[in-house]
Image (cartoon, rainbow, N blue to C red):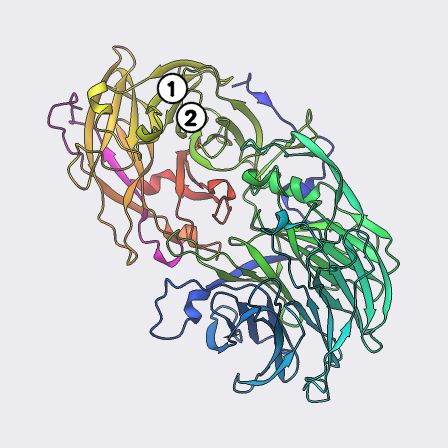
Amino acid sequence: MADLRGRFLKGVSLSVLFGLGAVSAAQAEYFERINTFPVYKTLPEGVDQATETVAEIIYATKDGRTLVFTDSPGEAIVFVNAANPLNLQPMGRTALGGEPTSVAVGETFAYAGVNTSEDYVNASGHLAVIALDGLGITAKCDAKGQPDSVAISPDGKFVAIAIENERDEDLNDGVIPQMPAGHLAIFDLDETGTPTNCDAVRIVDLTGLAEIAPTDSEPEFVSINSQNQVVVTLQENNHIAVVDLASGEVVSHFSAGTASAENIPVSKARMSDASGSTENVKREPDAVAWIDDERFVTANEGDYEGGSRGFTIWNTKGEVLFDSGNQMEHLGMANGHYPAKRASKKGTEPEGVTVGEFGGEKLIFVNSERGNFVAVYKDTGAEPEFVQFLPTHVGPEGSLAIPSRDLFVVANEVDSAEDNVRAQVSLYKFGADAPSYPMVVSETDPEKGAPIGWGALSALAADPEDGNKLYAVSDSFYDDARIYTLDISSKPAKIVAYATVQGGKQAKLDLEGISVAKDGGFWLASEGNPEKELQHLLLKVGTDGQVQEEITLPEELNAQSARFSFEGVAEFEMDGKTLVAVAVQREWKDDPKGMVKLAIYNPADKSWGFVHYPLDKPKSAAGGWVGLSEIVSMGDGKFAILERDNKGGEDAAIKQITTISLEGVTPAAYGSELPVVQKRYAMDILPALAEGKGWVLDKPEGLTITADGRLILVTDNDGVDDAPGETRLIDLGPASRLN
């Protein structure tokens, strides 16, 4: 395999790429995910659990034992008992009669911004004051517009609200200004936490500050320091203001300026390659958090004309102390969390930012909304040091540091029961000796100065001689089909090389199987799709990825085929012949219910034979289907089969390995009655998939046996497209466990 294109680490920090902290091993302390709580469990009794319900902005009570978050579609504030972080329990919901946009919590009350606007012109909303004792609303204070972010001062004397009065993106292509203009709303609190000016909110006019649309300030996010100064991001105006809460005076204001990022994906093509760069892009900050009383950090999501794909540290004078440049993009690429479909837009799209002190160090947490991760940095007073890469669920929106309990919390807002994606609250505990994630990272392409982009790993094969070398393929999520070389000698495993599959008659491939050919190169299985006129293909390719042979099924069988087809391939020896087995995922039109084909190809005479494999019936309460994902030769005509349902999370029921043998079984030509192989249950892999304490991933798709006899499993992350984005590479122990 020496002629695979090598991509070796050069000039990029190992700590950044491999998720290793910048501190010494003796000092190392990291976060470990300990729980993932589905938000639908907070729905009232009798409500259909498929009802959309999300977690967005999240806060905690002063003791850190109660989590409080907004549920926009549910028009409610949700309270969850976190006294035992391993066993969260719903406490109740407070109906608001409008859309909650943000929440903050004091000693006695929770304060929620509520949007009651009829339309974009008639903007309205209020501050709902909710008693923590009883969860009832004690006051509704008119905020004179549509609220967005809410913050409470550390001393409990003020609540500040960014009144956005957001623009209508369908009006005049969303161009601002659009009236009414937003403002900063300030409520003064007495010693009990009750607003003293509920009927007369103090308004800070923020118009006339920015150059872009000075009459339409568009405030987005607020954060308050110990000096009772609030920093306000004016996102669409690409501007930042610092306001004294006591006087309501603007202390300072300045443009958020622009930033550039080199060697990042920018093409509309579905690839995670460092194909270009961005120059002088408006930052347009969203979330903001104080680091200390003189410095704050912004997540530069963009919304109007910009989005610099990173984060920036500022002082109150408006001086840029640090800008992350391409770091968030490269983290997404190296860790397989790059949202390639968003490359031409805002990439990883950092949206949220949180600051907290853990282990005597001040840490900065930056959320990637589209990459489904949090990047953890240590504040140094100068350039921050990367510490850890944390996986989240889909759409991390709010985040929360609870240092008193050594907890970090992420609220994930995407929820669709129909698409098998449910909103979650994820908890991480500080104090682990080493990161458990990522499990796979890529080395740097020295030609492009960026990590090798990867994702959607759909199959595995082991090098026959090197016990630490694996090969993987990516599926049709990406425009290019690739063969990756993995070095698993260390944790995390490293993608060190790749080859692009090319030269075949069919340009678009959906690789779902790979096997090393004993005469050199690889066998690849490409899943077809009759509706898109894509053939089911068995490919013989060289180590350079060049297609040497395209093998199709008999035409009469193709007429019976369906969308779910080739899902694994394995070369094997039997009766003195070199043969190739291909697993079909689900039943075709001519298959009896519950039976799928295993296709056996003989390269010597180019013939096909077939057997039937009996699928388990679905066991999930959520229904779904069961199919095959991988086939692995164990020698002597024996195979390991990866069989799974299409459910994830708590609905996952069948994720298993079975074994079969072709000894005494003669594959039949198509049109004949097919023999049925006997399968033996060998291993439940659900416990291994659940060890990460996240959403149980629905797609374990790659399985192989290393040259030294280890059983290795990999999951498909769907290219981070409406999926958690995690890739789990799991050592299941000796393959002898299957016997």
Quadrant, the C terminus? top left
Which residues are drawn in magenta? Answer: 648-677
Look at 24% across and 35% down and name the residue there. 660
In three-dimensional space, the C-alpha distance between marks 1 and 2, rounded to whole angstroms, equals: 10 Å
Q: Residues within 10 Å of mark 2 (few under 14, many from 20)?
A: many
Q: What number is the disc on residue 539?
A: 1
Most extreme residue toward the top, as rendered? Answer: 605
Residue 575 visible in the picture: no
Q: Is residue 296 left or right of residue 402?
A: right
x then y, percent, for residue 726: 51, 46
Q: Is residue 702 left or right of residue 189?
A: left
User: What amino acid type is highlighted by mark number 1?
Assistant: Leu
The secondary structure type at the circle numbered 2 is loop
Relative to the observer, which residue lies in front, 729 or 349? Answer: 349
Above or below residue 186? Residue 676 is: above
The secondary structure type at the circle numbered 1 is strand
Residue 3 visible in the picture: yes
Relative to the observer, which residue lies in front, 268 or 360? Answer: 268
User: What amino acid type is highlighted by mark number 2?
Assistant: Leu
* The quadrant where residue 539 appears: top left
x then y, percent, for residue 268: 57, 33
Look at 57% across and 48% down and name the residue there. 370
Q: Residues within 10 Å of mark 1 (few under 14, many from 20)?
A: many
x then y, percent, for residue 151: 69, 71
Look at 34% across and 43% down and name the residue there. 737
Q: Are marks 1 and 2 in contact (CB under 8 Å)?
A: yes
* The quadrant where residue 31 appears: bottom right
* The quadrant where residue 710 appears: top left
Q: What number is the disc on residue 509?
A: 2
Residue 687 in magenta stretch: no
Above or below residue 121? Residue 720 is: above
Q: What number is the disc on residue 515?
A: none
